[in-house]
Image (cartoon, rainbow, N blue to C red):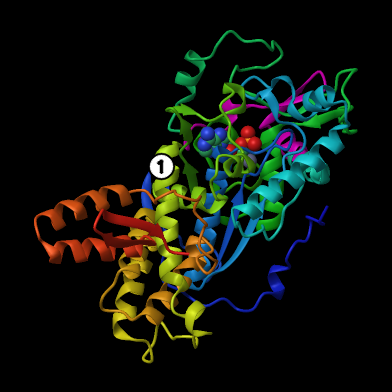
C-alpha cells in the first residue's frame, strides 16, 4: 500500500500566477460563476472519495472523473491545484438518512470474514488501481477517515460548546434548529424536511432532522474509539468537515461529489463546518449527475454495476469509457450502453490516429509552441476554442468537438494536429499519444459499413468525386478500400 498521507506544505509551493478564469456551476446559489480562489492562482479542491467496503463501479468513477477533469483543466489554464480526495473507512452507515443499518465497512468485514482494516486496505488499493486505469491524477492528499478521529472529536466538542450539538446517551447529535442556514445547499426548508420525514426510529433526537456527529458504540461494534462521551465512532458527515478543513483551511475553493451527496451529506457538512468557524467555508459546490444503465442509477444495491475491469471483458479499452464520460456534460445523466461505448471507441481511435502522425512514422517531432508569438496562427485559433470550452463550466462535449475539428483540419499540417491533440490531452487524459486500440479481426469501426454502402452507390452512379471523398473518410477511420471487379473490398490498416 502506498503511503496515502503525504500532505503538501502550502507554504513550500512557489508563488502562484494569475491565470484566466474558469467558470463553474455552483450548486450553492445555482449559478455558473468564476472560481475566484482564496489564494490567487491556487485552487483548493476537496472530493468526497470512496467508501472502501466494495469495488468502485464506473458510476462512482464518473463522479471522480468530473473532479479529475476540473483539476486538469485548472492546471492546463496555469493554476496550481491542491486536490484532497478522502478515503471513507468508517462511519458510512447503510442508511445515512437515519444513521442506521450498520457500518458498511463492518458489514463487509463480517460477510468476507476479514477485519474492517483488511477490507479498507483491499478496496482502497482496488479503487486506486481503477483510477489509474482511467488515467486519473492522484490526489495531492488522500486522507483516511480513521486517521482523523481526533480532529472529528475536536469539531464535535466545539459544536457542543457552541450549543449547536447535544448529547443523548453517549451519542452526539447536531441540533439543526440552531443553524439558521440549514437547507441552503439543497434548497429545502426545515419545516418541509420535517413534514417529509418517515416515521422516526431514534427517539432520543430532539428533531427528526438532527443527525449524529458521534455515535455510541454498541457491544458488538469493532471499530470504536474513546471519547469524552464514552466509546463510540464518528458520523459520516463530520469526517469530511474534519479532513477538508485540516488540509485546505477554513476557507477553500471547490468541493465535489455526486448529486446524491448534496443532501444530507453536504448540507450537514456545511452546518458542521460553518457552525465551528462561524463563516462560509466552501466557495463552489460541484455536483455530478449519475451514470445509468437502462436508465436506472448504477448502484451496488440495484445489482447493475459494471467495474472498470469488466470493460475489458466486454472488449472495451478503459479509455473508451473515459471518452464516453466526456461526451456528456457532468451535470447531465449519462446512460451506459454498448452502442455508446462502440461510438466512444471509434471517436477515440480517430483522435489517436490523428495524434499518432507524423512523429510515429517520421521519428520524433520537435516540440511546438502553441501559444505566444512563435505559435502557428491556425493552431492558436483552435487552442483558443478549446480553452473557451473548458473554461465555460467544463463544456467537455464542446472540447471534444474541437479536438475532432483539429483531427480533420485542412488548415493545419500533421505536426500541428498532433501537437494540438497532445496539448489538449493534458485535460482530456485520453492517452492520445498511445498506439491505436487494436480492432478485433474482421471488425469494422462504427459507421464504416454505412460509408461503404454510400460509396458503392456513388460508384454505381459514376459519381467518382463523392466516391473519393468517402474513400478518404474511410481512410481516416483506418479502413482501406480496394476496388475489384467483384466490388469494394474493405480492409483494416494495420
Ligand atoms: P460512495 O462510495 O457510495 O460514497 O460513492 C462514491 C461517489 O460516487 C459519490 O460521490 C456518489 O455520489 C457517486 N455515485 C454513486 N453512484 C453513482 C452513479 N451511478 N453515477 C455517478 N456517481 C455515482
Ligand atoms: Zn464527503
Question: Residue 180 colored magenta?
Answer: yes
**Element carrying mark 1:** helix
Q: Residue at left 73%, top 68%?
A: 9
Question: Residue 130 colored magenta?
Answer: no
Which residue occupies the foreground of this view, 177 or 490?
490
Instruction: Give the vertical position of 276 relative to 458 (above or below).
Output: above
* Image spot of residue 281 (x, y percent): 57, 50
Q: Residue at left 81%, top 22%?
A: 111
* Image spot of residue 306 (x, y percent): 58, 35
* Image spot of residue 222 (x, y percent): 89, 27
Instruction: Give the vertical position of 402 relative to 292 (above or below).
Output: below
Q: Residue furthest front?
A: 485
* Image spot of residue 303 (x, y percent): 59, 23
What residue is pinned by disc 1? 340
Q: Residue furthest top?
A: 199
Q: Which stretch is magenta?
A: 156-185
Which residue occupies the foreground of this view, 65 or 234?
65
Q: Residue at left 58%, top 31%?
A: 305
Looking at the image, residue 278 sits to the left or right of residue 34; the answer is right
Could you classify mark 1 by the number of other residues whose Cα lies within 10 Å: few (under 14), some (14-19), or many (20 or more)? some
Q: Residue at left 52%, top 61%?
A: 429
Amino acid at each position: 500500500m502506498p503511503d496515502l498521507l503525504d500532505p503538501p506544505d502550502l507554504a513550500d509551493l512557489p508563488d502562484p500566477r494569475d491565470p484566466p478564469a474558469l467558470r463553474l456551476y455552483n450548486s450553492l446559489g445555482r449559478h455558473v460563476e468564476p472560481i475566484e480562489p482564496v489564494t490567487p492562482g491556487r485552487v483548493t479542491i476537496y472530493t468526497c472519495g470512496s467508501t472502501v467496503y466494495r469495488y468502485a463501479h464506473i458510476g462512482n468513477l464518473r463522479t471522480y472523473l468530473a473532479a479529475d477533469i476540473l483539476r486538469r483543466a485548472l492546471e492546463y489554464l496555469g493554476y496550481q491545484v491542491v486536490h484532497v480526495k478522502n478515503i471513507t473507512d468508517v462511519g458510512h452507515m447503510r442508511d445515512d438518512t437515519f444513521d442506521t443499518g450498520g457500518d458498511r465497512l463492518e458489514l463487509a468485514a463480517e460477510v468476507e470474514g476479514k477485519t474492517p482494516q483488511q477490507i479498507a486496505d483491499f478496496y482502497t488499493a482496488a479503487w486506486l488501481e481503477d483510477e489509474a486505469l482511467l488515467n486519473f491524477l492522484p490526489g495531492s492528499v488522500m486522507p483516511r477517515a480513521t486517521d482523523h478521529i481526533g480532529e472529528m472529536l475536536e469539531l464535535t466538542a466545539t459544536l457542543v460548546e457552541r450549543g449547536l450539538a447535544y448529547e443523548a446517551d453517549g451519542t452526539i447529535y447536531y441540533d439543526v434548529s440552531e443553524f439558521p442556514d440549514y437547507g441552503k445547499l439543497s434548497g429545502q426548508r426545515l419545516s418541509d424536511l420535517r413534514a417529509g420525514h418517515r416515521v422516526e426510529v431514534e427517539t432520543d433526537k430532539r428533531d427528526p432532522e438532527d443527525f449524529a456527529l458521534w455515535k455510541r458504540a454498541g457491544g458488538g461494534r469493532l471499530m470504536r474509539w474513546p471519547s469524552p462521551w464514552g466509546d463510540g465512532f464518528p458520523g459520516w458527515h463530520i469526517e469530511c468537515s474534519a479532513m477538508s478543513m485540516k488540509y485546505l483551511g477554513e476557507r477553500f475553493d471547490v468541493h465535489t461529489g455526486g448529486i446524491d451527496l448534496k443532501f444530507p451529506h453536504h448540507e450537514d457538512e456545511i452546518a458542521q463546518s460553518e457552525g465551528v468557524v462561524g463563516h462560509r467555508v466552501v466557495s463552489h459546490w460541484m455536483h455530478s449527475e449519475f451514470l445509468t444503465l437502462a436508465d436506472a442509477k448504477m448502484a451496488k444495491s440495484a445489482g447493475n454495476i459494471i467495474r472498470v475491469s469488466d470493460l475489458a471483458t466486454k472488449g472495451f479499452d478503459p479509455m473508451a469509457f473515459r471518452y464516453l464520460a466526456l461526451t456528456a456534460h457532468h451535470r447531465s445523466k449519462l446512460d451506459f450502453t454498448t452502442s455508446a461505448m462502440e461510438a466512444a471507441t471509434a471517436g477515440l481511435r480517430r483522435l489517436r490516429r490523428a495524434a499518432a502522425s507524423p512523429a510515429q512514422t517520421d521519428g520524433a517531432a520537435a516540440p511546438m509552441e502553441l501559444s505566444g508569438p512563435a505559435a502557428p496562427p491556425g493552431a492558436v485559433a483552435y487552442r483558443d476554442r478549446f480553452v473557451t470550452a473548458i473554461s465555460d463550466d467544463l463544456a467537455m462535449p464542446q472540447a471534444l468537438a474541437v479536438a475532432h475539428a483539429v483531427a480533420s483540419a485542412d488548415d493545419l499540417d500533421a505536426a500541428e494536429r498532433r501537437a494540438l491533440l497532445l496539448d489538449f490531452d493534458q485535460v482530456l487524459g485520453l492517452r492520445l499519444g498511445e498506439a491505436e486500440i487494436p480492432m478485433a479481426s474482421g471488425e469494422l469501426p462504427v459507421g464504416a459499413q454505412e460509408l461503404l454502402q454510400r460509396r458503392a452507390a456513388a460508384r454505381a452512379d459514376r459519381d467518382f468525386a463523392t466516391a473519393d471523398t468517402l474513400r478518404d473518410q474511410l481512410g481516416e477511420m483506418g479502413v482501406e478500400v480496394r476496388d475489384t471487379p467483384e466490388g469494394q473490398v474493405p480492409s483494416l490498416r494495420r
